Image (spheres, helix red, strand yellow):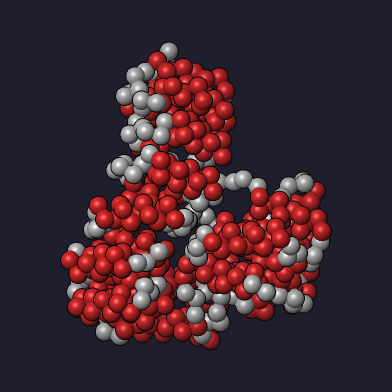
Amino acid sequence: MPTPEQLIYVLSSNPSDENIKLAIDSIKLKKSSSKSAMTLVETLMDIPRAAPHLSALSTWMKTARWRNLAFKRLCSLEHLDWILTLLKENPKHRDAGALWDGLLSSYTNREIVHGASDWLLRYGADDTYASAVAARLLRESSTHDLIKLSRELLERNPDDFMLARALINRAPDDYAIDCGIQILIAQDPVIGGMVAPALATSGERGAEAVRDFLKKNRKSKNYIRIIDGFTYEAPELAAVLLAEWMSTHPKSKDGQRMLTDLLCHLPSQELTDLLWTWSKATNPKSDILDVVAIFSTGFPAPADAVEYAESWLEANEKHSLWIAVLMKVVEQNQVEKQVAILNRWHHRLSARQKASMTAVIVKVVVRANMDGSSIAVALCPELQEIFKQQIETAELLEEPMSEFSLVNQIARKEPLSIQTGKNWLVERRLEWRWSSLHEYRGEIIAALLVSAPDDFVCEEARRWLDKGSEPLFESLYKKVDALYRQ
């Protein structure tokens, strides 16, 4: 029998069913405490076709350590189902809490949320990871039992800033706010900064405590890190604080990075202009990536920023970032400007670069159609042909069309595409928290609310909105919410 180390090497080059079964047989011969055997299990987690065979390890896994599985990026729904079965069959396993915590940190699948809630309420109240699991669940759910247990857990450990923050955001009461204020006052300022954004929007008492906290730490070396904590939870306040701080720290690279981050979470013309103005003031030869960041907001860039970007493209065609800069500039600009830039530069693209630009071209046409604009017809014939071929290829292969194409067809009220969109919403998939799935789902829901707002679509919109706004897609959530309430 080959060693686990040898099998890991074999599987990397030839993950055949035969080798997968050989690996499983090898694991079963090892003690469940064997680190090399567990490493082999983790290798099988990276192989989609291994999923149907993993049930053979169920007995061996009962006494093995699971903690490393919490950090694995799953490669298929079948792997998720196997892990969920393990957790359901072994709810008192010493690593159950760690594994639930890992799944909740990475995925938003309903079965994970339901499974973790059931485990926490029935078995996990005394687990080491109980508070962490509760804090993550509060992002997805607000049931009476979950809130009650979360409060009990906070009473056991009132210094738990993650749980205090989650409770203040989801179900603020006097005790949770008191704990948050105490964390703000007594703990390290960086830790206090973790709970400050939640307190700032919890009511006047919490907001006053945050104002005092910020005033006290304004000259602290950690102040910029404190502001950074507001970027995701309270971007509007972060923008105000950062603008004030930048006035006395004009050359800070941290400030420039945070401005770029804020533009992702709180797109605004004011922040767009501020970033460009600051870039010019601190570095006249501003890095091209700063220009790209400006365009990423979807707001009109300052005129001199446009001139800078276009002159850079003109003079740097052989630069390794050239196509990336062109794509970014086109992708996030206003649709009229998108078309103009594509028409201007397409003839300089190689065949490979045009292939890279296909998704961008499709997106331009789709968004033009979604806006009811006829601007897409201004695309030069060659680019219109690329779009046409993309759609025809998807239909010819009978594969799901790109999300952009699907949204476009739904907006045109084509019955087959409307049904495809509904099927897409109910299809099971791995919902990785940091993927663009939230955006795709929101785009499709928005299109369906316009074209076919029946009970199913409204229920999907409500469920999606109830998950809580992801800051990166804040504007999309607002759009769906407005359509849902019509």
| Figure check: 222 above or below 74 | below
In this picture, residue 303 sits left or right of residue 194: right
Residue 353 shows in this picture: no
Determine which quarter of the picture holds residue 157.
Answer: bottom left
Q: How many marks?
A: 0
Q: Residue 208: x percent and y percent?
A: 28, 79
The C terminus lies in quadrant: bottom right
448 in relation to 21, above or below: below
Q: In the image, what residue occupies the spot 56% across and 35% down?
A: 78
Q: Quadrant of residue 352?
A: bottom right
Give the camera-side residue of 402 and 474.
474
Front residue of this view, candidates 331 and 213: 213
Q: Residue at x 43, y 13 (%)?
A: 1
Pick whichever, 291 or 439, lies toward us.
Answer: 439
Residue 449, percent across and down? 70, 66
Closer-to-camera residue (246/102): 102
Q: Position of residue 287 (x, y in %)?
A: 42, 73
Q: Is residue 63 something one can see in this rendering?
A: yes
* Residue displayed at 23% across by 65% down: 183
Q: Residue at x 65, y 47 (%)?
A: 427
Farthest-out residue, top:
1
Residue 396 location (% of width, % of height): 80, 48
